Image (cartoon, coloured by chain):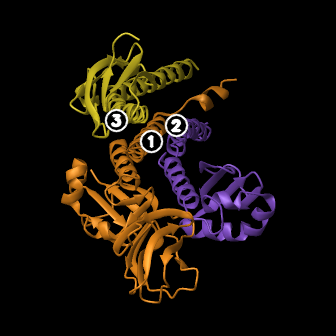
Amino acid sequence: MDRGQLPLSLLEVAVGVVLVLSLVGTVALGVPGPDTREPQLDAYASDAVTLLANESPEHTGVTRLAEVLDSSARFDRERETLDRRLDRILPDNLLYRLETDHGVVGYPLPAGVTTGSARATTGAGSVTLRVWYV
Amino acid sequence: MNAGLPRAQASLPALAIALLILTSVTVLSLAVADGALSSADRAPAERHVAASLADRMIAANGPTAVRRNVLSADRLERLNASVLGEIYPVAAEPAVRISIGDDRVVNEPAADGGTTIRRIVAVRRSHNRSITPAFGPNKAVTIPRRTNLSRIDLDPPNGTTIRTVRVSGRVVLRNPAGLAGKYTLDLSRFETTRLRFEGSGPLHAGNVTIEYPVAETHRTTMAVTVDG
Amino acid sequence: MDNRGVTPVVEKLLTIGIVVLFIGSTTAVLYGSAVPEYRDSVGAELSDRIVVSAAEQIESALPPQGIDSTGTVRLDLPATIRGEPYALRTNGKTLVLDHPRPSISAEARLSVPARVDSVSGGTESRGEAIVRFTQESGGVEIRLGGAP
């Protein structure tokens, strides 16, 4: 007779505790990450595109970037150099993807990752740079 | 029949224990809520000041900028909190720290804290290089680096008159009576410059000295921290 | 047999009474102290962010240099903080958020270029928050509020 009472109230306590903890869990786990990440990534992308777009040309174009975007053939020849240059410009903790009309330079875009982006327009076309934290 | 009834009753000590556990869980959840609230403090004012100061520093008309995102190493060396504070009053406060790469430009660091905004910049160090080229019969020379200005010193030998100086085909200096002395030419950094001297008589090595700035840039990160 | 019939009822009533008392007292304690405090600190956080967001919206809506123009911008602001409407006013070149509760007021410095001559006016949060830019011969005047 007495034996049956304690386990039942323990069950009630357990249910109550689970209810309270589940509500607490939504508060503890539901706080989103700081929103300084995306504006910072956007700033990085805009800086990188500015530095890339304003470099002096090596041949005949208006800027280096306009040169590379001039034609598909030239883009294919110079994409390695563009990749290396972008790698040097951006800090080590970022990965990047540069989308142009003639092709893409950089790493594949992972799903569900916060990215920052920036666009630049040159006389020969426009490019979009996306960056994200490694 | 009646045997089922006592089983459904909670005895009072068990109830007391149950309420005690529930109370402690509630207190625990209040502590978690407190922690969540304090971690959600983003200090938006700090972020705002840091972001706008960083924007001003890298802008094309910033105090140390050569062009957008490119800063001059000379002007950076002369920059400090009071100099920057004259332009942007907020920068004179000790809570604002600016550093380029590993060097502190404005204010010494205290402890880690506050909000930091980072921008990618190129720091440009320039020095002057001068050449005294030898000339062939066409009296033309190409400047080896693309540059936006050059200073030339014309010292033609006796019997030689330089009447026109052309930069990549365009006439920039002309004097039918003869040019001599120092001139500064504005060039375009987007094209290779070819100087051509026209006139009568030959030119030899040493008659023309061309001085032009050569810049090296290296890319680093500028961090603007605002604390409090 | 009868004794056994009374004691369980009394015990159940006692149990119910204790549990109701517990719930009532916990609710009273929470709503008396913890909940208003949390609402206040959340309100203070919100007002900080709102005033900074308003400042950023104004800064990014500045007309570009050189063209004489007038423009208006509608600020995107929530209608109430902590259930009460607030007002946005200016103090020199600082944006001040006035809230009936003093702990929820906040301010943010507007970082605008030197060509901005004056920042004036104020607006309520309940209606539309209009900001008017007037650029004339190089100087810009910013005015909050007024008819749209």
Residue at the disc numbered 3: C48
Badge 2 density bin: few <14, some 14–19, many ≥20, Cα 10 Å: some
Tag 2's secondary structure?
helix
Residue B115 position within the rendered picture, expressed as x and y whole percent measured from the top left = 37, 53
Tint applied to chain A in the drawing: purple
Chain of the residue where label 1 is placed in the rendered structure: B
**Which of these two is toward me, B163 or A15?**
B163
In the picture as drawn, the residue positioned furthest to the right comes out as A73
Chain of the residue where label 3 is placed in the rendered structure: C
Residue C33 position within the rendered picture, expressed as x and y whole percent measured from the top left = 30, 30
Chain of the residue where label 2 is placed in the rendered structure: A
**What type is the residue that disc 1 sits on?**
Ser
Badge 1 density bin: few <14, some 14–19, many ≥20, Cα 10 Å: many
Tag 1's secondary structure?
helix
Calculate the distance from the C-alpha at mark 1 to the C-alpha at mark 2.
Answer: 8 Å
Q: Are marks 1 and 2 in contact (CB under 8 Å)?
A: yes
For residue B108, above or below residue B152: above
Tint applied to chain C in the drawing: yellow
Residue at the disc numbered 2: A20
For residue B206, above or below residue C132: below
The chain in orange? B
Residue at the disc numbered 1: B29
